[in-house]
Image (cartoon, coloured by chain):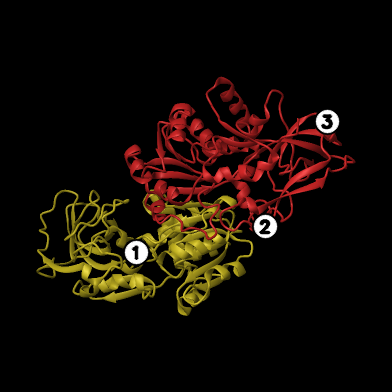
Chain colours: A red, B yellow
Amino acid sequence: MPLQTVNRQWLLARRPEGQVRAGDFKRHDAPIPAADLAAGEILVRNLMFGFDPAQRGWMDDVASYMPPIAIDEPVRGSAVARVVASANPAYPEGAMVRGLFGWQDYAVAARSNEAAPVQIAQGVAPEQALGVFGAASLTAYVGMLDVGRLGAGDCVLVSGAAGAVGSIAVQIARLRGARVIGIAGGPEKCRWLTEDYGADAAIDYRSEDVRSRLGALAPDGINLFFDNVGGSTLEAGISHIARFGRIVLCGAIASYNDAHPAPGPRNLMRLVSQRAEMRGFILLDHLDRIPTAMADLRQWVQSGEVRYRVDIQRSFEAVPQTFLRLFSGASQGKQLLRIDGAE
Amino acid sequence: MPLQTVNRQWLLARRPEGQVRAGDFKRHDAPIPAADLAAGEILVRNLMFGFDPAQRGWMDDVASYMPPIAIDEPVRGSAVARVVASANPAYPEGAMVRGLFGWQDYAVAARSNEAAPVQIAQGVAPEQALGVFGAASLTAYVGMLDVGRLGAGDCVLVSGAAGAVGSIAVQIARLRGARVIGIAGGPEKCRWLTEDYGADAAIDYRSEDVRSRLGALAPDGINLFFDNVGGSTLEAGISHIARFGRIVLCGAIASYNDAHPAPGPRNLMRLVSQRAEMRGFILLDHLDRIPTAMADLRQWVQSGEVRYRVDIQRSFEAVPQTFLRLFSGASQGKQLLRIDGAE
């Protein structure tokens, strides 16, 4: 049963120009959707939001693998929710689900709309469903193993290595026997990399010259570079790519807030002389791998071989500020927000 | 028998800074190598030089797939030559050979040194051995078919399409049933593309906006982009890459003479949203394909299905100026030079 009388929402007020700001969003109170659902639909009550840099891209008016978020619509985003009314026997009332339910208290979801709910297994907490068992980890898994074709003897570089995707990418590479170098911002995140995630070395891009450090740490070159950052970090990695090396492009958080796209790497000819490849991917093309990936992740988390961090903010009012933490580097792990008034 | 008393040479006088200039080379008269050869060696008399943009890269002091050309050494380059003395039964005196014999009248060559002579089949003229049956065509072949995995339904884009590599790439794509768009400089070269090489459309980068023309010519995107140019041409191609598209990086003639590397494409995130790949290659990794490629090329040339153009300059003294034609766009086909005094 609804616990509130309104459906609180954060709408996209305008398309961000360059750096996304709190003023790009606006609070709105909508009526709670009626519980007279069409067959297949469910009404969900959001409990926790998960934040992802990809949401920034959806805010631009650019056709991509998903349509842009419409102005004055709730911002598209992942959430864990409880089913409060159901016209779909697969999702009974009371079940816990994860989906693209958006920045609001309540949503009507169905397999046929973009919310795409999936039920959460017993014993999995919301912060796990949105974090270590969420899309970021699955992205790290297919990016490393399928797109990047990780080999045991590889020297692997991961940028954004302390983030939700990067920290799992680092640990998968380590578990498969690779030598791993991680790039992160600040001494604390670099310490997570080597002490918690088992990276062989960490580079602090805020205080160190990434390019020269790579030369020292990887004298024979990088066989596999899993890049979440783009920009000068990508250029530095290309400059040390090994012969027949693979660069997996997962994202480019460095550039998401550029009003005008920044120049790309100046050294792409290195891909020719090193016969290297660079390949973009998104998780949606690898859905067939999810059962295997989930089984592996569950086992690794259970055994303690894979560790993870969550950064749980609170209060529905703080949703935009929490999103901005992704880009300032403030997030201390997978960025989440527990919705007040929901339980 | 030597026809001259000296071995004319063009040495690399200094490393070019940015734009290569005639003054980066100097003429030198060396003694003709003695004919007392070690076992396996041959003495060759060069008859014709072939010029290639890759030579510009070898002039920089940068480790690549080949060592830099040493200062005060003859410039490394392809030539067709006649064997004038032989200590290798595979290359009898009088045989015609092709190899990296350098910018000089005479060279001592062996399978074990970088000259790597190969005998030229009966009936193949020097301009064919250096042109349509040379490394440029083989590069186009493996780049299109093996690296680019050309499919019959592909919409293919080739930059530098009127050049030695590009013109063959265009024709191979057409012969395999693809739709082909070529980019070249000037109306005459664009006419070659559509009238002689069978491209479906040509874009003149000197007078047209490549990006908007691509939008009109390839509304469903480019499935395979064979890039010889780099720079803004590469950026334009990326902006129209189709989902799961492949970009084959063969070279980047736009940048070879940059003193400071120019910024790269600003839109590499497009490789993520389109799940596209970009891959550099060099012919040396595909030597096993050469017999098949040569057989196909011979048949296509014989049947007239593949056409080619050569631009034959004359006079040993004109070697540096002829090399510079590659970068000014003056070359009217595969750039060659027939050596005076050689026959």
The location of residue B24, given as percent across then percent down, is 22, 67
Q: Which amino acid does the dot numbered 2 rest on?
A: Arg
Chain ID at mark 1: B
The location of residue B35, given as percent across then percent down, is 11, 58
> Mark 3 Cα within 10 Å, few/some/many (few <14, many 20+)?
some
Of B125 and A310, nearer the camera is A310
Q: Which amino acid does the dot numbered 3 rest on?
A: Glu
Q: Residue at point 20% right, 67% down?
A: B25
Mark 3 vs 1: CB contact within 8 A:
no
- Give SS at disc 3: loop
Q: Residue furthest top?
A: A303
**Is residue B333 positioned above or below A316 on the image?**
below
Q: Which residue is mark 1?
A: B258
What is the number of the mark on residue A93?
3
Mark 2 vs 3: CB contact within 8 A:
no
Looking at the image, is mark 2 or mark 3 nearer the viewer?
2
- Give SS at disc 1: loop
> Mark 1 Cα within 10 Å, few/some/many (few <14, many 20+)?
some
Indicate the quadrant containing the N terminus of chain A: top left, top right, bottom left or bottom right. Answer: top right
Of B6 and B77, nearer the camera is B77
Chain ID at mark 3: A
